[in-house]
Image (cartoon, rainbow, N blue to C red):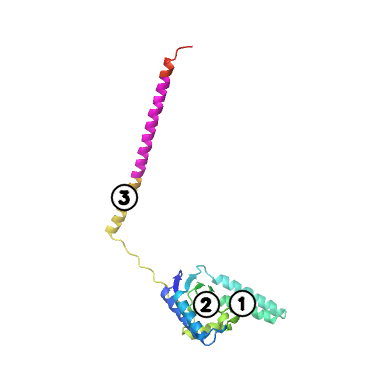
Amino acid sequence: MKVRNTTDFDTRALRSWLRRVVRHVEAALVKGHPLGWPEQAVRARATLILTHCDVWVRQTRRDQSAIALQAHAGWLGRAKKQRALGNERSAQVAEENAERWILDGGTGRAAYSGRRLRMTLHGGDLVSLLWLARHETWHLFGVRHEHFPDSVMRETASSRVAVALLFGVTEGATLPRTPPEPKSVPSVEDRASAKLLRLTEREKAWRTKLKRAETALAKIRKSKRYYAKQIAVAAASAQKMPPR
């Protein structure tokens, strides 16, 4: 599993949790794959994912809270209107969408071939990562949405509790962040060497400009001599011509 991590979170922790999710899904699908895959095929796919899957984990940098709250309120308003009209099923769907906006910790895309996975996290919530990773990993094992169990298909409060229990994490746990690299303080010798290098580069640049200027001046002097000679020749020819 090749993990490309462009988030603020530790790559080793991400890789470790992703591998655990793959092993969990493998164990679940060995007992019964929705498409009837034999145990050997499921285990072969798990090996392929852990060995060759190209994973890119990204992160949204803007604050999603205001957007989520606005969408949540909008769906609740829709649910109220549908219930007033007697459309109970539509009201329930709207309420589920409202809950999903509050719980949504990220988005993802996975190839059914098991070779490509893209996830975008909205934050460092560990339960959100595990839920999303499990959902996308089912896709990596060739399963489409119509064959998903409801707990894998929809992120709800109950499905989050189930994921937390399954992986032994507590609600509110977060991914560790990548420790910042310590800033090294350059020594006096290092600073002097850097300045000397910059001065040397500037000197080289100015010498190049000087050489170009000297070449240009030489061409100008040559052209001036040529045209001065032309003027002298023309003047001499004019003096030798007899008057008309």
In the rendered image, which quarter contains the N terminus? Answer: bottom left
Q: Which residue is mark 3?
A: 200
User: Whole-Å distance between the Cαs marked 2 and 1?
Assistant: 25 Å
Q: Residues within 10 Å of mark 3 (few under 14, many from 20)?
A: few
Residue 51 placement (x, y as % from top left): 44, 76
Residue 232 placement (x, y as % from top left): 40, 22
Name the element at disc 1.
helix
Q: Residues within 10 Å of mark 2 (few under 14, many from 20)?
A: many
**Identity of the residue drawn at 41% across and 27% down:** 227
Dividing the picture into quadrants, the one containing residue 32 is: bottom right
Residue 83 placement (x, y as % from top left): 69, 80
Q: State the residue lying farthest toward the bottom.
A: 31
Tag 3: residue type? Answer: Thr
Q: Which residue is mark 1?
A: 97
User: Whole-Å distance between the Cαs marked 2 and 3?
Assistant: 56 Å
Closest to the observer, 159 or 172: 159
Q: What label does residue 140 carry, if any?
A: 2
